[in-house]
Image (cartoon, rainbow, N blue to C red):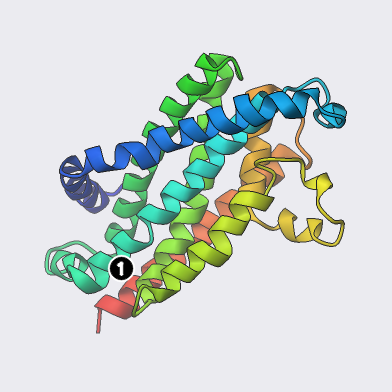
Amino acid sequence: MATPGALRVLEHNIISYKRVWKGTVFSSFVNPVLFLAAMGLGLGTLVDAGARAGTLGTTSYLAFLAPGLMVATAMQMAAFESAFPVMAGMKWRKTYHAALSTPLRSADLVAGHLVFVAFRLVMMAVVFAVVITAFGAVELNRALLATLPALLTGLAFAAPITAFAGRLESDYGLSSMFRFVIVPMFLFSGTFFPIDQIPDWLQPLVYVVPLWHGVELTRGVALGMGTTLNPFVHIGVLVAVIVVGFVAAVRAFEARLIK
């Protein structure tokens, strides 16, 4: 994926990011930490002491929530970075059109974008790992290992959303995507509670959601616990989504930019 052309695109994105990075600190780092403190320490105290405290076994609610929130934050960051910025480069700023005037190809643009998203995800996940360790939720070595499935999950959203944004003519579709796809996934994919707590008829739908596979993997690594399915099944699903999304994104860019 990291071809010479893709690295040029990555370089451009990093230079652009240097101008705006301060504005992303709150949404990328501070907001999730505050959310973790409120839900994990505040609500978590009530959950651990409540009538259904045994639902999570011997795991505290803070420890249960922390890895799930890490991967859910990765999903949100990847979705945002692959939605409006892609549409801006395609429709408003026309940076992709300008890039194709050089030897770069559509595949380079997509690959460079995804590598940049991976760069952002690694930064976020490492900081998040340190924070949840400081909170006493997870051991540092396990928290750092958990950044890998979080990265994989983020890319599993970045690739198909890049393809989706690359074909849109307006940003209304992106707003609807966040409202009707990203937010429900955030709430009902096992981040905040085990999915066996939701109605039986809804559980099969959760099993096909990439975020659930990411939550299962990340929580399994962070807490040293087993996953619902074989870990390689979870990994296979996420990798398949990334590959299909990448191919779809390249085709979307070619259809839009090469006429």
Q: Position of residue 148 (x, y in %)?
A: 52, 33
The residue identified by callout 1 is 87
Using the rendered view, name the quadrant where residue 63 is placed.
top right
51 vs 152, left or right, is right
Give the residue drawn at x 87%, y 30%: 51
Say few, some or many: other residues with alpha carbon within 10 Å of mark 1 (under 14 / 14 to 19 / 20 or more).
many
Q: Position of residue 139 (x, y in %)?
A: 59, 14
1 vs 235, left or right, is left
Rendered view: 209 above or below 2: below
The answer to whether residue 1 shows anywhere in this view is: no
Using the rendered view, name the quadrant where residue 90 is placed.
bottom left
| 90 or 130, nearer to the observer | 130
Q: How many marks?
A: 1
130 vs 197, left or right, is left
| 142 or 60, nearer to the observer | 60
Q: Identity of the amino acid at label 1?
A: Met
Give the residue drawn at x 29%, y 52%: 112
Rendered view: 166 above or below 111: below
Rendered view: 178 above or below 78: below
The answer to whether residue 53 shows anywhere in this view is: yes
Q: Position of residue 8 (x, y in %)?
A: 19, 49
Give the residue drawn at x 52%, y 52%: 156
Screen quadrant of the C terminus: bottom left
Q: Position of residue 100 (x, y in %)?
A: 18, 68
Describe the element under mark 1 as helix, strand or loop.
helix
Give the residue drawn at x 66%, y 48%: 212
| 97 or 62, nearer to the observer | 62
